[in-house]
Amino acid sequence: MNAILATIGNCIHVQGIKNFENLLNKNGIGTEFIGVCIDIDKLIKIILDKKPDIVGLSYRLEPENALLLFTKLNNSIRENHIDSKFFFGGTPAVCELAEKTGLFTGVFRGTESEDEIVDKIFQRKKKLTAIDYPNTLYERIEKYYPIPLIRHHFGLPSLEKTIKGVEEIAKSCYVDIISIGPDQIAQECFFNQDNICNEFEGGGGVPLRKKEDLETIYTSSRIGNFPLLRCYAGTNDLIEWGNMLKDTINNAWGAIPLFWYSELDGRSKRNLMNAIIENQRAIKWHAENEIPIEINDSHQWALRKTTDPIEVVSAYIATYNAKKLGVKYYIQQFMMNVLPEISPEMDIAKMLAKLELISELSDDTFTILRMIRTGLASLSVDEDIAKGELASSITIGMYLLPHIIHVVGYSEAYNVATPKVVIESSKIAKGVVKNCLKGLPAIGENKKIIKRKEEIIKDVRVLLETINSLGDNIDPLTDPNTLYMAVKTGLLDAENLKGFNPGKGDIKTAIIDGTVQCIDENSGKIISEKERVARLNI
């Protein structure tokens, strides 16, 4: 096969047509670029002389002029009985006109993937089905990595709108994992609906009230790129929730806290000791049923204004529990920008400390999957600014080489994410990934990052040693009583735990040089973790 390529009319823009030429060459098609601003009469003469299989044209100026060019081209092709296949690339407005002419075998706006363009060139009609998309998390990661999977939260206050929205998102093919967000009633009372207060119907997500609701949502997602589905966990009856999600939506992974969904955060009435015990049982149940697990405790501590070392130690404890409870695939979520005032450099230092410590637990039986996420509180209520903040956060997170990007919709600082917002935000993420995979500037020699990472690791080891000393059994970090006492004594503490039993909320923090530090309430001076622990008089 051979092709001739040109820009037509008075268009001098060649980048698009040259990209098309490179793609043709990659696929074994010989090309000749015949020039820019080629008028239609000259183009027809060259086509008649060279008899190419493919003619690639581009025009990126005014749609009105393009229409005149297309009309003349159409008439000339018919008069001269030309049977070459014509392809066109241009601006969306011009492409819309090009499609209406019926002249072109393929019209490209610049949003298509290489595979989509090549399929058009060779006229391959490929209808992807469920078999083309792995239906387990690890298999899908293996297929696409180093391109991370895109995950997005979705759940509207209307079940019907949620079902339609899931279908729309799946059709877009921009989201690999849809996380269904149930409302608070579903999370707390799904298996005990006798005392539901209808005043809170749909609060915080989709009002799931029966198993069939989830089955219908799953059915609506079996289209497009057949996304994996998962669902936020219940705050009560966690094993019952896990079983139902396994049966209805083939839950991609479970997200079970260790300390939370308890009296400690007010999202459940369970006392902390019972919550830890039940949460561990739920994690073990998921492990026994070969369902990957995420324990997202660390950013819950961070969101309540804890220090960097406490955030990191909570990640280690969570990961340690997952491994000891038999989890095979473990998802570690790295929520960036928490608190929003921290610096990107120090954010990376904290996350690298977290990754280095939990990676000590990785082996042939325990695989850690990295997921990055933008901190919700870091996004502006101004949509345009929020889009920039979202892209910036993902760029920094890409230094962690994530397997999954948990995209936060740019509107979520002030409004629930609609299907439109979910798709647009996911496209922003994909644009960031495309550029980052070309190569990010190295940070391995950044002395500030290395120094802060080592400081955090040192503090974490002090804290781990002290928590271990609370227990009198062989494995303190999995002992519910030890974990409970770590909170009760203030070893694990956060400013915003004041008033949430048994949390202390006595710690005082401040952003200093882009890091979250423990400070003396009176002097404002930084207190090392060793000194903070000593002051607790445990």
Image (cartoon, rainbow, N blue to C red):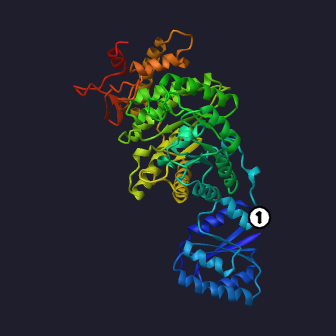
Tell me the quadrant of the picture where the N terminus can be found. bottom right
**Residue at the extreme front:** 194
Residue 401 visible, this angle: no
Disc 1 on helix, strand or loop? loop
Q: Nearer the viewer, residue 5 or 199?
A: 199
| Residue 157, position as x, y percentages in the image | 52, 53
| Residue 238, position as x, y percentages in the image | 59, 33
Tell me the quadrant of the picture where the C terminus can be found. top left
Residue 32 visible, this angle: yes
**Residue at the extreme left:** 523
Q: Nearer the viewer, residue 291 or 237?
A: 237
Give amino acid for label 1.
Lys
Left or right placement of residue 409 versus residue 50 in this view? left
| Residue 396, position as x, y percentages in the image | 47, 44
Quarter of the figure with residue 504: top left
Numbered label tally: 1
Give the residue at x 76% y 66%. 122
User: Could you classify mark 1 by the number of other residues whose Cα lies within 10 Å: few (under 14), some (14-19), or many (20 or more)?
Assistant: few
Q: Is residue 120 above or below residue 198?
A: below
Give the residue at x 53% y 58%. 424
Give the residue at x 54% y 78%. 11
Q: Is residue 339 above or below residue 358?
A: below
Report which residue position mark 1 lands on. 125
| Residue 427, position as x, y percentages in the image | 55, 56
Left or right placement of residue 313 versus residue 332 in this view? left
Q: Is residue 59 above or below residue 532?
A: below
**Residue at the extreme top:** 472
Q: Nearer the viewer, residue 136 or 97?
A: 136
